[in-house]
Image (cartoon, helix red, strand yellow):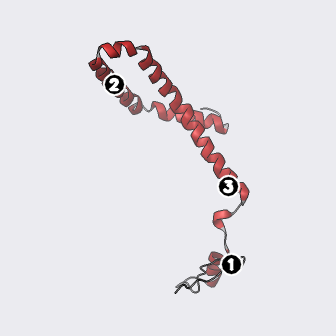
C-alpha cells in the first residue's frame, strides 16, 4: 500500500500544522519561505563561482610547490637510482623542512595575501 500526497504548486510538501509554542506568524513564514533558493539561477551561478575560485586558489598555492618538488626529484633522478637510501634521507629532510615551514605560518600568510589580492583588498 502506497500513500502519497501531491503538493499543489507553490505549496511546501510537508507543512507544519501546529508547532508547539510557536506563533502562527512564524509557522506561516516557515511554510512559505524559500530561503535555500533565494536568488534563483544567480544564486547557483554564485555558488559555482565560489567553487571555481577555491579551485584556482588551491592551484595557485599548491602548484608551485609541487612543480619545485618534481623538478628537484627529476634533476637528481640519476643520483637517487644509484643511492636508493639517499632518497629516503632526502624525503625525511624534505618532510622536516615542510613541518618547519608550516609551523612558521608561511603558507597561511601566502594564502591570505593571494585571497586579499583576488578580492581587491589593499595589503597592510
Q: Earlier in the sequence, mark 3 or mark 2?
A: 3
Q: Which residue is mark 1?
A: 11
For numbered disc 1, what is the local secondary structure? loop
Quadrant showing the C terminus: top right
Of 81 and 51, which appears nearest the observer?
81
Where is residue 4 drawn, in percent x and y?
59, 83
Residue visible at 38% across and 13% down?
78
Q: Which residue is mark 3?
A: 44
Q: CA distance from mark 3 to mark 1?
A: 22 Å
Q: Name which quarter of the figure residue 27 lies in.
A: bottom right
Instruction: Work out which residue is located at the far left of the displayed protein and give it.
Output: 85
Q: Is residue 63 visible?
A: yes
Q: Name which quarter of the figure residue 11 lies in.
A: bottom right
Residue visible at 59% across and 33% down?
114
Mark 1 burial class by Cα count in 10 Å: few <14, some 14-19, many 20+: few
Q: Cβ–Cβ below 8 Å for labels 3 and 1?
A: no
Where is residue 123 drawn, in percent x and y?
61, 32
Q: Which residue is mark 2?
A: 91
Residue visible at 54% across and 37% down?
58
Where is residue 65 drawn, in percent x and y?
48, 27
Q: Is residue 110 visible?
A: no
Residue visible at 61% across and 36% down?
116
Q: Cβ–Cβ below 8 Å for labels 3 and 2?
A: no
For numbered disc 3, what is the local secondary structure? helix
Q: Earlier in the sequence, mark 3 or mark 1?
A: 1
Q: CA distance from mark 3 to mark 2?
A: 43 Å
Amino acid at each position: 500500500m502506497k500513500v502519497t500526497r501531491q503538493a499543489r504548486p507553490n505549496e511546501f510538501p510537508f507543512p507544519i500544522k501546529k508547532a508547539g509554542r510557536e506563533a502562527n506568524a512564524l509557522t506561516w513564514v516557515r511554510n512559505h519561505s524559500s530561503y535555500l533558493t533565494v536568488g534563483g539561477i544567480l544564486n547557483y551561478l554564485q555558488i559555482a563561482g565560489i567553487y571555481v575560485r577555491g579551485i584556482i586558489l588551491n592551484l595557485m598555492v599548491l602548484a608551485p610547490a609541487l612543480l619545485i618538488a618534481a623538478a628537484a626529484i627529476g634533476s637528481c633522478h640519476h643520483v637517487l637510482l644509484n643511492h636508493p637510501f639517499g632518497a629516503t634521507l632526502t624525503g625525511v629532510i624534505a618532510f622536516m623542512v615542510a613541518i618547519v615551514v608550516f609551523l612558521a605560518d608561511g603558507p597561511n600568510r601566502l594564502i591570505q595575501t593571494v585571497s586579499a589580492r583576488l578580492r581587491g583588498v589593499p595589503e597592510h
